[in-house]
Image: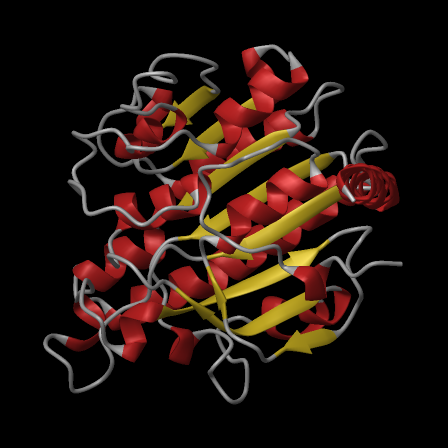
């Protein structure tokens, strides 16, 4: 009986290993980019009935990939905690000023360790300087280890807020190069900034400008022979904004209302079916787990789940 039990366990391990290898071989993705449009409310993006402010994302780009209609931030709805959840797969109450490191290691660290690549293979390019904390962790086994490159804030100095056009110029430089990063997160801030400024018109204009940036990024990916047909792009948000009638409305965010929690996710790439709308609930923690699967590295600290609908078994 003991021999039979050991044989069954061995068989299960072999089958599981074979399945994992088969799964890995199926993915065409070699590069993954995350575009985070900071702080739009769902009602002004995909939830706007006529797609008035995001005409490309809501129409032509949406038809090119998998759209998650019930995608949520189920943790603190602020910039630094929201981005931290994306890259670590964990929710954490932390300073939104960029004065504290995430408690858990991130996708960049796991990827760089597993791949043995140089730091330039992973990048965070952000208009908000405080987001340079995303590449590090306070975890004692990972602190200051396997750090990705950063270009955050004005001229990449890690301080203050830079302009989105300058940030996107850096993104353009990296994406159009002959050796683009394999894993990159991009943050665009204008939507959030004009929301906080209580400037409704500029807030909406910034949503439309971000729509154009998203389209341009996908176009550049397809134009680079290194990236074309082997790059997955995830377009998402870190948080929304207060629902109408809740506190200050679109001006701020940070509570548990639907407006703050309901964000969006659009997945584009060679492994993703075109034109599907996923209605089951998904969570921003799932991004890290999904990236670790399609990029073939372990990420045991992530609490996310694999986004199977966007990467179905063939």
Q: Please report the residue visible at 42 percent of the width from the left and 24 percent of the height from the top.
A: 151
Q: How many marks?
A: 0
Q: Is residue 138 left or right of residue 226?
A: left
- Viewer-proximal residue among 146 and 57: 146
Q: Is residue 132 left or right of residue 55?
A: left
Q: Which quadrant is the C terminus positioned in?
A: bottom right
In the image, residue 172 sits, relative to residue 187, either above or below, namely above
In the image, residue 17 sits, relative to residue 218, either above or below, namely above
- Viewer-proximal residue among 252 and 176: 252
Location of residue 44 in the rendering, given as x and y in whole percent from the top left corner: 41, 76
Location of residue 32 in the rendering, given as x and y in whole percent from the top left corner: 65, 39
Q: Which quadrant is the N terminus positioned in?
A: top right
Q: Please report the residue visible at 44 percent of the width from the left and 37 percent of the height from the top.
A: 301
Location of residue 135 in the rendering, given as x and y in whole percent from the top left corner: 40, 26
In the image, residue 314 sits, relative to residue 95, either above or below, namely below
Is residue 313 visible in the rendered structure shown here?
yes
Q: Please report the residue visible at 37 percent of the width from the left and 47 percent of the height from the top.
A: 85
Q: Is residue 1 left or right of residue 218?
A: right
Location of residue 88 in the rendering, given as x and y in whole percent from the top left corner: 42, 39
Q: Please report the residue visible at 71 percent of the width from the left and 56 percent of the height from the top.
A: 268
In the image, residue 44 sits, relative to residue 33, either above or below, namely below
């Amino acid at each position: 009986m003991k021999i039979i039990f050991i044989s069954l366990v061995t068989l299960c391990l072999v089958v599981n290993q074979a399945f994992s290898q088969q799964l890995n071989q199926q993915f065409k993705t070699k590069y993954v980019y995350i575009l985070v449009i900071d702080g739009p409310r769902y009602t002004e993006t995909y939830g706007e009935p006529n797609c008035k402010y995001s005409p490309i994302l809501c129409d032509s780009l949406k038809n090119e990939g998998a759209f998650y209609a019930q995608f949520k931030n189920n943790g603190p709805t602020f910039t630094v905690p929201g981005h931290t959840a994306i890259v670590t797969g964990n929710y954490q109450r932390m300073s939104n000023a960029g004065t504290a490191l995430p408690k858990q290691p991130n996708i960049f660290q796991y990827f760089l360790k597993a791949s043995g690549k140089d730091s330039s293979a992973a990048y965070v390019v952000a208009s908000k300087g405080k987001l340079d904390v995303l590449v590090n962790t306070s975890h004692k086994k990972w602190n200051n280890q396997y750090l990705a490159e950063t270009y955050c804030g004005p001229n990449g100095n890690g301080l203050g807020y830079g302009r989105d056009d300058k940030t996107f110029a850096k993104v353009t430089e990296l994406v159009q190069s002959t050796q683009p990063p394999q894993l990159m997160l991009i943050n665009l801030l204008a939507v959030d900034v004009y929301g906080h400024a209580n400037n409704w018109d500029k807030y909406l204009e910034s949503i439309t400008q971000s729509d154009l940036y998203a389209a341009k990024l996908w176009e550049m990916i397809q134009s680079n022979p290194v990236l074309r047909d082997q790059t997955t792009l995830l377009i998402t948000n870190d948080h929304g904004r207060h629902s109408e009638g809740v506190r200050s409305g679109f001006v701020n965010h940070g509570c548990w209302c639907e407006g703050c929690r309901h964000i969006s996710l659009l997945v584009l790439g060679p492994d993703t079916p075109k034109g599907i709308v996923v209605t089951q609930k998904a969570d921003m923690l799932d991004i890290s787990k999904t990236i670790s699967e399609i990029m073939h590295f372990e990420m045991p600290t992530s609490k996310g789940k694999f986004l199977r609908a966007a990467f179905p078994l063939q």
